[in-house]
Image (cartoon, rainbow, N blue to C red):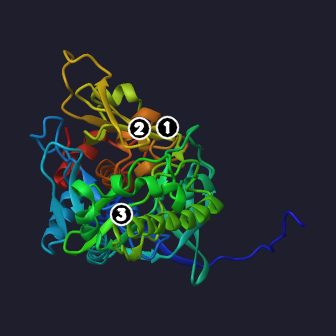
Amino acid sequence: MISYIEEPARSVPVAHDCDLCVVGGSCTGVFAAVRAARLGLSVCVVEQNVIFGGVATAAQVNEWHSIYDANFQTVVIGGLTIELIDRLKKRDAVRELPRGGRGQFRFNSAEMAGELDRLVVENNIRPFLRATCVGAVRDGERIRAVVIEDKSGRRAIAARFFIDASGDGDLLRRAGFGAYQAQQLQPVNLQAVVANFDAARAEAPDGDWWKSVRDLSEQHGYPTTTASPWPFDVPGAPGLTNVFGPRVSGVDGSNADHVTTALINGRSYVRALADMTRARLNVPLPIVAWAQALAVRQTWQAKCHHQLTGDELLGGVKFDDAIANGTYPVDVHHPGGTYLRYLDGREEIVGPDGSHRWGRWRDASTPTPRCYHVPYRAILPKDAANLLVAGRLLDADADAFGGVRVMVNMNQTGEAAGVASVIALRTTNDVRTIDIGNLRRTLGEGGSVVV
């Protein structure tokens, strides 16, 4: 068997030339593109899926977490996160959850994808869908172009500045900038929309569907060492439920073979849940839509000018270059369960069987920070003059990453990267030397909460 083949050199046509190219069309990536476009830049966004929104839409993770401070009194997350939620409210496609929990908004993923389309079109952003970043042209500290492959073939996009919001470092790593993976990656999920779940819950004793069917797991091929699946409603779609499949460890979401196996296994697990429900409760649970992507929590992270630490996060350390805020707890999934550490010092241990055990990681007498913060330096790759990262590519240790990785936090890093690119283009031509005061002020003027 041969190990390699040789490809002849070839010329790659330039399909587009712009001020800013964003690789990755998640909400984070679209928000980066929108903020830059609204400030006058010509922008394009490259997305590997058929819809924008990433984990929120293609992976059908249809919940965003709290936008409030630790006391649930003051809003600490604003900007395009709130604008998009307001757009969904007009379509009855979002439900706001009561304050006091981790969740804040439950939304219709399909409707969100439609609103992201509108944001892209309204702001004259050039979209490239079903397009994958496969290479980069680099000149020293600067990227000159990205190489994509789509239905039209192999093409290039030239730009003055770049943002990698791909989650996997598709541009960052192909351009040769520093990246690393944690020793143990957080698990993945696969979601599916099902019908008739309310009927199944009604047939279950005490309405506890999972407790009723759980003992059938091994018989039907459902993982027995995972926490209970989560059934979430789909706002605006009565009768439909978004079922979060089991958390599967040992999957690298940036590895094509891992992804293929996880997608096939993930679908078999949700089908097993349907079979278990029919066998025990005599209620059909038809699957009406599969998520088109895995819900990936972690793959690669950029080596940046600052690595955010768990102590900084949970201590509410304030940074002069803060560009994002949050209160979601440190939430680290692992094969033996999940541990969560809250800003108020509580600790929650969730076992593989779904059991909860509470304790404290910090003395109750210690004051609770209002929120935590993400510095600009944590999205600023080392040795790069015209590249920023956004989303889960940021530089953070295991505990800090467990808290900041959720979408309402990462959305803000996209907005900051978009604004920083504008400032760099108009001033120093280098994302490392921009005026941080100008960045924070411009973010605030655009609706972000800067504290």
Residue type highlighted by circle 2: Gly
CA distance for labels 3 and 2: 20 Å
Q: Three-letter amino acid code at disc 3?
A: Val
Q: Is residue 348 above or below residue 224?
A: above
Give the position of the N terminus as an image quadrant: bottom right
Left or right: 92 as drawn, with respect to 102: left
* Lower position in the chain sequence, tag 3 or tag 2: 3
Q: Which residue is located at x 48 percent, y 65 percent?
A: 272
- Given residues 392 and 424, the one toward you in this image is 392
Please give the residue where the numbered disc 1 appears in the rendered image.
336
Labels 1 & 2 near each other (Cβ < 8 A): yes
Q: Which residue type does callout 1 highlight?
A: Gly
Q: Which of 208 and 280 is in front in this view?
A: 280
Q: Is residue 72 left or right of 171 when viewed as pictured? A: left
Element on which disc 3 rests: strand
Above-or-below relation of 324 to 237: above
| Residue, far left | 73
Q: Are the two marked residues, 3 and 2, in contact with CB atoms closer than 8 angstroms?
A: no
Checking the image for residue 351, the label placed there is 2
Do tag 1 and tag 3 residues touch (Cβ < 8 Å)? Answer: no
Sequence-wise first label, 1 or 3? 3
First-in-chain label (1 vs 2): 1
Whether residue 279 is visible to the viewer of this picture, yes or no, is yes
Estimate the spatial distance between the alpha carbons at disc 1 and disc 2, rounded to whole Å: 7 Å
Quarter containing the C terminus:
top left
- Sort mark 2 into few (<14), some (14-19) or many (20+) by Cα contacts within 10 Å: some
Rendering coords of residue 81 (x, y %): 23, 57
| Image point (41%, 54%), residue name | 214
Which residue lies under the disc numbered 3?
243
Tag 2, which secondary structure? loop
Residue 267 % position (x, y): 50, 68
